[in-house]
Amino acid sequence: MTAFEGFPEICSTARIAAPDAFGYWEQLVAGAITEVSIAPTVSRPFEGRIRSADFGDISVGTVVAEGHELRRTRRHIAKADEFHVIGSVVLAGHAEVEHAGNRVELAPGAMIFYDTSQPIRWCSQGLIEDLTVRVPRQRVVDYLGIRADALPAGMVIRDGGVGPMLARFFRQVAQLHSTDPASAAVLASSGIDLLGAAAAIASGERPGRAQIEAVNGQQVLDYLRANFTDPGLTIERIADGCRVSRRTLYRVVAEFEGGLGAVLREMRLERARVLLVASDFRSIAAVATASGFATERQFYRAFHVATGMTPGEYRVIARSGSPVS
């Protein structure tokens, strides 16, 4: 099965051979996502895995499961105490969905919105993995300033940008939760802007300014993570790579703690810490270059300021198994 990382709150695994044992899997899905009825679509023993974490109003979950059919019926809806909007990003596999008058096929990278006040039929014929972000329905309505019937239920974003970006963001939130729950909760609450932007895009509306800034900020961070090892990274290249103006980029990075330089420096230092312990990197100069520092001297200075020790001292302590900061 696909490995999960960073979802500390609920972690449940099921291996089910008999169709009537799906009651157990239904309970797991109800706890992490919403109440449904489930039946297998494969003849082999069913395997499924759920991990989820709650951050106040926002819940994040990842599901990996064999082929199955999921239905949320009017019976489930009548019993519900609260309704939610769920943004779901397919990470692997394929599914067919019928919801709110829409019938769509989902492939990796696609993002779909569900309104749990309406029936849902969802079906996969093989292994599938997706990430879900669940928010109370009324909060989404109030936040976006729209009518409840204008929610983008059953609508899909297929551009390959917003959905995967949202998935990366909330996976990072969940990973942070295992080491710093308070910071993770703050970060998760800001994710409502990303979710709101995705919902607006799905419904054909233009996102508000706060939502656009959230998308731009996450886009810049994603670009930096992919390119921070390049010592020649410039404002112009970042702006071009993110398809934003320099003015927009300056506004976005002004919100980063310490500014753009601090974010790049921390990414490079984190990579350097890993490489200093790796056996295939013998010279400090090679670590500096592979981490994105322009010179070895620049690396030494930044590393000493951040850790209080030289890269060589850090390497000796880390390789000895002693804790290092």
Image: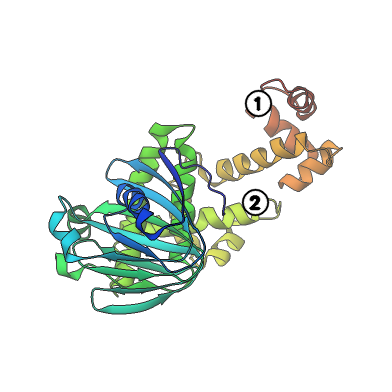
Q: Which amino acid does label 1 sit on?
A: Thr
Q: Which of 210 and 295 is in front in this view?
A: 210
Can you say which quadrant of the picture contains the C terminus? Answer: top right
Which is more N-terminal, label 1 or label 2?
2
Q: Which mark is residue 228?
A: 2
Rate crowding at label 1 as few (under 14), some (14 to 19) or many (20 or more) other CA atoms within 10 Å. Answer: few
Q: Is residue 219 above or below residue 307?
A: below
Out of 191 and 55, give the one closest to the viewer. Answer: 55
Mark 2 burial class by Cα count in 10 Å: few <14, some 14-19, many 20+: many
Residue 250 in sight = no
Q: Are marks 2 and 1 in contact (CB under 8 Å)?
A: no
Q: Which quadrant holds residue 251? A: bottom left
- Which quarter of the figure is the N terminus placed in? bottom right
Q: Position of residue 163 (x, y in %)?
A: 44, 64
> Label 1: which residue?
307
Residue located at (84% from left, 42% from top): 280
Residue in the image at 29% along x and 67% along y: 200
Q: What residue type is labelled 2?
A: Phe
Q: In this view, does 265 lie to the left or right of 175?
A: right
Which residue reaches farthest right? 282
Q: How is the model colour-coded?
A: rainbow
Query: Percent position (x, y) of residue 314?
Result: 74, 26
Give me the C-alpha separation between circle 2 and circle 1: 20 Å
Determine whether the residue tagged by mark 1 lies in a helix, strand or loop: helix
Q: What element carries label 2?
A: loop
Residue 102 appears left or right of 81: right
Picture coordinates of residue 255, whole percent (x, y)? 43, 46
**Most foreground residue, 1 or 91:** 1
